[in-house]
Image (cartoon, rainbow, N blue to C red):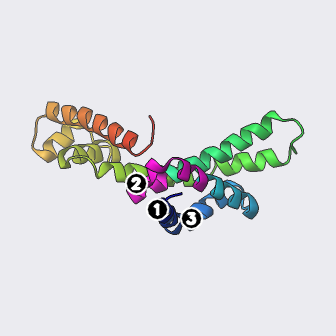
Amino acid sequence: MPKDEVALMQHVHDEHAEVLWRFCLSLVGHDRARAEDVTQETLLRAWRHGAILDSPPAAVRSWLFTVARNIVIDDWRGRRARPETSVAEVPEQRRAVEDDESDRLLLSWVVAEALTHLSEDHRTVLLECYYRGRPVAEVARRLGVPPGTVKSRTHYALRALRLALEEMGMSA
């Protein structure tokens, strides 16, 4: 591995490994050994997909969290398909994956980061219409623009948000 790749991987490890391990720990029902395995596999996949490492830190972290979550889900699905797996393990892992609030937290971080890539007008209409739940007429009145402008901005803002999320490695 070239020296600059080693330094980049070391930087990614220093910046994200501890938080990633804690996230993995919550995904696997606080099984420390399993969390370490998932963390190592996630970092290995990051090294194999080196292009992601040049992204902004928030995008790298969201990518790492998504990969870790997918590793846990894939493992759970594999165990579920093999009848020799202990039946007692599966419900605990299912709860850890399905009931975990970490997914919502991760998604909110990713969306918040993606919103920073939008223009002020687009960000404002999305926050007013979706986050605050205000009707188009009220948003139009608050912004001093016609309702059609609010609708148009919302349409293009959602397209821009989708593009920003795709650039961050999230697929719709």
The residue indicated by pointer 1 is: 8
Give the residue drawn at x 40%, y 54%: 54
Left or right? Give the position of 63 relative to 115: right
Looking at the picture, how far across and down is residue 2, in whole percent? 49, 59
Residue 108 appears in view: no
Which stretch is magenta? Answer: 43-62
Quadrant where the N terminus sits is bottom right
The residue that disc 2 covers is 54
| Residue type marked 3 | Ala
Query: Which residue does the image show at 57% across and 67% down from the upper left?
Result: 18
Could you say where residue 30 lies in the image, as x and y percent from the top left?
72, 62
Quadrant housing the C terminus: top left
Q: What separation in Å lies between label 3 and label 1 (alpha carbons)?
A: 13 Å
Q: Is residue 101 magenta?
A: no
Local crowd size for mark 1, using a 10 Å CA cut-off: few (<14), some (14–19), many (≥20) = some
Residue placed most toward the observer, 16 or 130 = 16
At horizontal 60% and vertical 51% (from top left) the residue drawn is 68
Residue at 51%, 63% (x, y): give it.
Answer: 6
Q: Earlier in the sequence, mark 1 or mark 2?
A: 1
Residue behind mark 3: 17
